[in-house]
Every structure is written in structure tokens, then in C-alpha cells.
Image (cartoon, grey):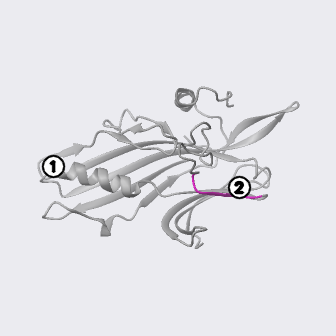
Amino acid sequence: MTLGKIAHKGSVGKGRKVEVRTDEEVALSSGKKVPSMIALEYTGADAVKSKWLQFVWFELVATAPDKNTTGTGTFPMNSGKDLQLTTESAKPVWGVDGGASEPFYEAPGAEGAQGLNIRNASTSTMFDDPGGDTALSMAQSLSSARPKATEVVFTAHFDSYLMQPQKSGLVDTPRVVGGDH
Amino acid sequence: MSWVATTKFKVDTSGKLTIGDSKIKYNVEASGQVKALPADMRKVLAANYKDIADLQ
């Protein structure tokens, strides 16, 4: 793994910190290396119990000399719940970038795959690289429908939260740290 | 924290996309503040996961 460039570093309590890195290269267990990822990392107490909760909305816009065209349709999510593309940025269509039955990023999706993550006693890190082949395919379709298009831009907007257990009597209930909406 | 990932695809004269310029660019905004999940996000959560316990 090649660490990326630090985009944010902050404290979320005594001995607890969150770091965001961009353009990180991650080596998968298969040996494949994935470049240009973003890493959201928590270091501190309760790391093993910490989970990432992430919300997202997508937009696809083709630029042409005469006018811009906004893409429509749905983007397939790991959860199995397809997310409608937002057509008015002032009215984003939010979805949860989580698992099939649990909302957390690390939870198994509809086909069993988890969002890429590393968790151990001291850190909980999630990795993401939105878009991929699906965005390319959708961009190609929109471009084909707009022959004068010179550029197609896929944008994914995220709001991410670190969820940690909080002692409440004998019951652990989740609390949010590091959120910034 | 909020972050945005942008991928730009250039379209060549034949209408095909060139992915050479498609590297994801990230923009991260975070204050490090500790705060509760906003009400609008709770609604999104509830709409997608019926069995989720109430999150503080």
C-alpha cells in the first residue's frame, strides 16, 4: 500500500483522530493494485467496533457548445438498492453507501462484497474510488445521446460519519464522531 | 465530513470517451467537529433500512 496525500487531519476526542488521504494506492489480497483511492481512517479507542456510515448522491453532466445535458437513470449500489441520478443539484437524491441489510460501508452488499476496508485494534480505515466502469459506461451512453458533447463529468458527493459505540448503562449505542455536514 | 469525487471524461471527435483524463479528483471538507447525525440523513437512513436502531 502506498499512502496518499493527507487532505484532512483532526481530533475527535482524547487519543482519537481521523485522517483523510487522497490518491492512495491499495494492494488487494489478490495482488491487484488499485490507484487513486480515498482513505478515511480512524485511529484510537474502539477502532474494532468503529464503523463508517456514508451517504452519497451522484450527477452526470455532458457539456456541449450549445447546452449542457444532465444524465438520468440509476447507479447500481453495493447494497443492491440502485440510486437515482440527481438531475437538480439543489435537490440531491441521497442514498446510503452501505451493505444490503446494514447501512455501514463495511457491511456485506447484496452480492456479499464489502466496501474495501481495514479494521484492527487501533485503526478503522475505509477506501473508496467512486465511479469506475459503471460511470464510464453511463458517461458513454450520455455522450452518444449528445453528439456535440465535448466532455462528460461524473460527480459523486459524499457525507461520511464514523460511528462508535457509546456506553449507556449496560447497552452500547452508536454515536457519531467526525461528522461534518 | 463531506467530500466530492469528480471524474472528467473527454469526448473525442468520433464520439468516444478518452479515459486518459479521467483520474478522480477529490475535494475534502471537514472541521473535525463531533456532532450528531443530521435529521435529513436520519430520514435517508430510515428510508433505506427499516430495521436499523435509532442512531444518536
Q: Is residue A44 left or right of residue B34?
A: right
Lower sequence index among marks 2 and 1: 2
Please report the residue visible at 75 percent of the width from the left and 49 percent of the height from the top. A13
Tell me whether circle 2 and circle 1 mark residues in contact (CB < 8 Å): no
Considering depth in this image, is A81 or A173 the residue closer to the camera?
A81
Give the magenta-colored segment's residue range: A115-120
Q: Whole-Å distance between the Cαs marked 2 and 1?
A: 46 Å
Please report the residue visible at 75 percent of the width from the left and 53 percent of the height from the top. A16
- Where, quadrant-wise, is the C terminus of chain A in this rendering? top right
Q: Within the magenta stretch, is there residue A112?
A: no
Residue A180's spot in the image, x, y percent?
58, 43
Q: Is residue A178 left or right of residue B44?
A: right
Under circle 2, the secondary element is strand
Q: Which residue is labeled 1 in the image?
A: A146
Please report the residue visible at 64 percent of the width from the left and 29 percent of the height from the top. B52
Identify the mark at residue A17; answer none if there is no mark. Answer: 2
